Image: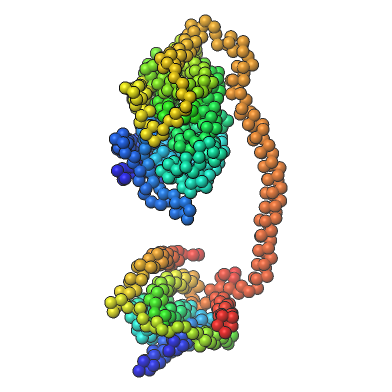
Amino acid sequence: MEAIMFFILALMSVGGALGVLISKNPYRAAMWMVLSFFGIAGLFVMLHAQFNAMLQIIVYAGAIAVMIMLVMMVMDRRTIEGLKRFNPQPIWPALIGVALLADLGFIAYKFKIDLSNAGKNLTLNGSNTQMIGEVLFKHYLLPFEVTAIILLVALIGAVVLTKKDIN
Amino acid sequence: MKVILLFVILTPLIGFLINGIFGKWTKPVAGIIAASALGISFILGLFPIIAVLKGHIVEYTYFTWMPLKEVVVPFGLRVDYVSAIMLFVVTFVSWMIHIYSNGYMAGDRGYARYFAYLNMFVTAMLILVLGNNYLLMFVGWEGVGLASYLLIGFWYEKSTAADAGEKAFVVNRIGDAGFIIGILYLVYYFGSVTYSNVFPRAEHVLGYGSTAATIIGLALFVGAVGKSAQFPLYIWLTDAMEGPTPVSSLIHAATMVTAGVYMVARSNAIYSLSPIAQEVVASIGAFTAFYAATMAITHKDIKRILAYSTLSQLGYMFIGVGIGAYWTGLFHLMTHAFFKGLLFLAAGAVMHSMRGLLSIDLMGGLKKYMPQTAILMVIASLAISGIPPFAGFFSKDAILGKALEMGHPIIWIIGEITAFMTAFYMFRMVFNVFYGEEKVPGLYHDLHTHEAPKVMTLPMWVLGILSIIGGWVGIKFGSHIPIEWFITHTAPTTEVAHEAHYPEIVLMGISVTMGVSGIIAAWLIYIKKIITAERIANTFKPIYTLLANTYYVDEFVYCCIVKPFWWVSTNFLWKIVDIILIDKGMVDGTGWIAGRVGKGLRVLQTGFVNNYAYWISLGIILLSSWLLFVKII
Amino acid sequence: MLTGYMVVSALLIAIGATGVMIRRNFMIVLMSLEIMINGAGMLLVVMSYYLGNVSGQVMFIFVAAVAASETAVGLAIAVMMYKRKKSVDVNDFSILRK
């Protein structure tokens, strides 16, 4: 049962990713991307990472996908749909991609770790969220604050970039 | 109490930040902000002082400043019997001078900047005084040095002022090097820089008469020589008079320059272990006292006379701390802060109403125009000349009496001669400025000379009263002298075995005779004109020239130190090292290499985003392959 | 099972990288970047599960934050370039060269 679930969800995520890769229409590509994100969220649930699954749906499938689509909405439809699908000579980059896949796949195949702790220590009082909160605010408080600053900088950067008229 | 003590330091800091950052807007009220910050600081400072009077030592550690592995340096403040006096003097005199500055600096372009610097100075000075370890003292030490530099060069448009600031800074560096070496030795021997950790163990760790104690003592004393302007590092202090007069009063007379005395008195536990270091301190002090007094006799610039007299009085303090009677040095420090602060403020008032004129040759008979300033100047001069019952008498007499008692008759003789000269040059100035007839007719009318405003005379009066009564704590009361009893709680006077007793009344009589005869001599020469100053100068022409040119020390330094230094800098460091090695070799060379490499790599830069992604991916493949073949398989 | 998860994540990364290299449309390049980041983040969660340590999941939160910032800036650049060139073709964005 678990294997079947994994297979379906993996197919969703990888299929969505492939959809992004080959679909000509960017609006469709965005929908494929959302599908892929949902698949990944499902995989997270299987990995006992409920909080991250919700985060995945809210941030990626929600915020980021909507943001990308909103930007595409303000652009002229013909300019973004009329583009050719691939760069000239797509074969070389495709080969690099395949090589990368082979490389990473081989690493995955060779990768061995001690699995005795699998699935443990992920919850506190039966709640994954509580555990993440404990760890995040006890051990990773400073990185957390730095992340806040990164977000602020990105916000300001985005505003400055879009506001300024460069002529 | 912990918070109160912290706020003693923080209040001037807040004043500094307000005036420093918002100076543009606070300009009309900058002086009020700064002076009230000091007032609050003074009142808050009274609480720890009262606690000390009751017999407690107030010490708090706020946080660990440098948690090093071997040496832990805390940020802590300590008020004990030594620093309580300094705390009182620094906050009180600074407060008075802040108030005075409101009148003196009115209308200056850098009004807010001036008060910001002044508050910064007080902050640093309080850190120096209250810090509970040597490193914190060093922070304050450098902080006051910086403030002094900024304030000497306050009118930086004048090149003399800017140069004087630089000179003060550079000369002080020499002393600071000694101080740092001393601190490092302390770390080496004690593994700590905290007073409460070092002093009780000093005798056990170093041992009486050991070389280590001598080295530490001398190294610290080099720092004190620089900051307190003793021979041979005194040359910066007279030039420092380029700054505004209240600054000269506060920094270069009353507080900062006494930091060296404070530091030696603070380190008494170490000095009392080393008779050699003590001897050096006392000798340098005695020499400077005499040497500076001789130069003060010939000068004609009011502020320079006072500057040399400061050097001389600092010499007395070093005699006090050097002979082992630390309380006398601190006592003189306190009374000196009152009367020398007052002298400078009065000189500032004269300068203020004379539109910046300083030469005593131009004045005379000023008493008619500035009666209050004249009275105050006379009070302060009597105090510095050691006439009872003014403050200077008690402290100076205590130092000289102790010097004789501890078996230093030569120092005692030098001290008495210097006392005579002190009285002479002070009253030479007073008589020339305030008494006699006007030397330049009509000058005062042209300058609209008038008495200083109330905001300036009031602090002067306060200091004047203290110049009278400030020394009374040194009167023997029962079997104790109150100030001695107070200070020696932590700084025990090293009682030397061959303590000799001289009848006190005779010693006092000699001191008073010296002071009075100096005044009479000045009176005979400058008022009665029995023998004119010019004739004396002509009789002793070579000596007079030597003194008037301050022993040609500045010229000597310029010829023998500054010039060779410049020569090496220009011909070797600039022309060879800088131009050939650095500019041609390193800077241009780097550019050349970068240009060559860039030309080669330009081919790879297509500008297409995808191409960059290829390279990144190839990099990932290479890295992961390396991981695959080297690490895993 | 671990190998399966790792292969999925490797596939996501490889597909995302290929998309970045191969596509012309800047919007799709951005989407491919998101997929790549997600593949990497997923590996964190996978390892968190198999090592029994929740730190990996915490790291994923940071990755998500960085991805959001990156998308914001990337989209800002896209909007700016669109205003300037009336195009979202990455081959038009080669002003670095000129």
Where's residue A79, x and y in %?
47, 79
Where's residue A74, x and y in %?
40, 75
Q: Residue reaching furthest left?
A: A125
- The vertical placement of B485 against B631, above or below, is above
Where's residue B33, x and y in %?
34, 38
Q: Residue at x 71, y 51 (%)?
A: B580
The N terminus of chain B - image quarter: top left
Q: Residue at x 46, y 21 (%)?
A: B500
- The vertical placement of A114 against B163, above or below, is below
> In the rendered image, which quarter is residue B83 located in?
top left
- The vertical placement of B613 against B294, above or below, is below
The C terminus of chain B - image quarter: bottom right
Where's residue B494, x and y in %?
45, 31
Q: How is the image coloured?
A: rainbow
Q: Residue at x 44, y 36 (%)?
A: B266
> In the rendered image, which quarter is residue B623 located in?
bottom right
